[in-house]
Amino acid sequence: MKKKEITIEDLARMVQSGFSDAKKQVDARFDQVDKRFEGVDIRLDNLENKVTKIDSRLDNLENKVNQIDRRLFSIEEDVAEIKIKQYGDLLKRINFIERKLGIAKS
């Protein structure tokens, strides 16, 4: 068998071709990775928008609950005041009746 002589130029072309093929493969992989990251970025942006909307809705809900709490507190105060007034009125009436009947406690 006859051996083929490889020159330095042939070797340089083979190495250059190998590097060129490797670069094409790496570039293709980077393109795939870039596309995947673009998809992830879009999904994260959508998620961030949804979280922002949820935060806004929770803020609105918190404000409404605080308003209801203030109104309920006011109602509770009014009811307590009414009870005290009615209790006082009833005590006066009972005392009057007991005095009239002569059963008042000393």
Image: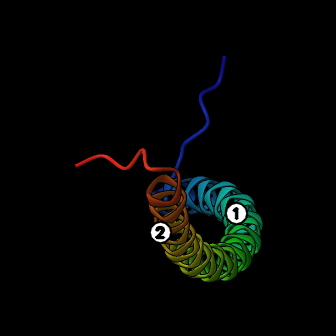
Q: Considering the numbered disc 1 on the image, is that residue within a helix, a strand or a loop?
A: helix
Disc 2: which residue: 92
Q: Is residue 36 left or right of residue 66?
A: right
Disc 1: which residue: 40
| Quadrant assignment, res 33 | bottom right
Q: Considering the numbered disc 2 on the image, is that residue within a helix, a strand or a loop?
A: helix
Name the one closer to the observer, 84 or 47.
84
Q: Position of residue 74 (x, y in %)?
A: 56, 81
Q: Which numbered disc, 2 or 1, marks the residue that appears first in the sequence?
A: 1
Name the one closer to the observer, 88 or 94.
94
The 10 Å Cα crowd at callout 2, few under 14, some 14 to 19, many 20 or more, is few
Residue at the (61%, 80%) spot, across then down: 59
Q: Amino acid at mark 2?
A: Lys
The extreme left residue here reads: 106
Residue at the (55%, 65%) spot, across then down: 93
Residue at the (50%, 76%) spot, across then down: 81
Residue at the (72%, 77%) spot, across then down: 57
Q: Nearer the viewer, mark 2 or mark 1?
A: 2
User: In the rendered view, would you say 59 is above or below 32?
Assistant: below
Q: Amino acid at mark 1?
A: Val
The 10 Å Cα crowd at callout 1, few under 14, some 14 to 19, many 20 or more, is few
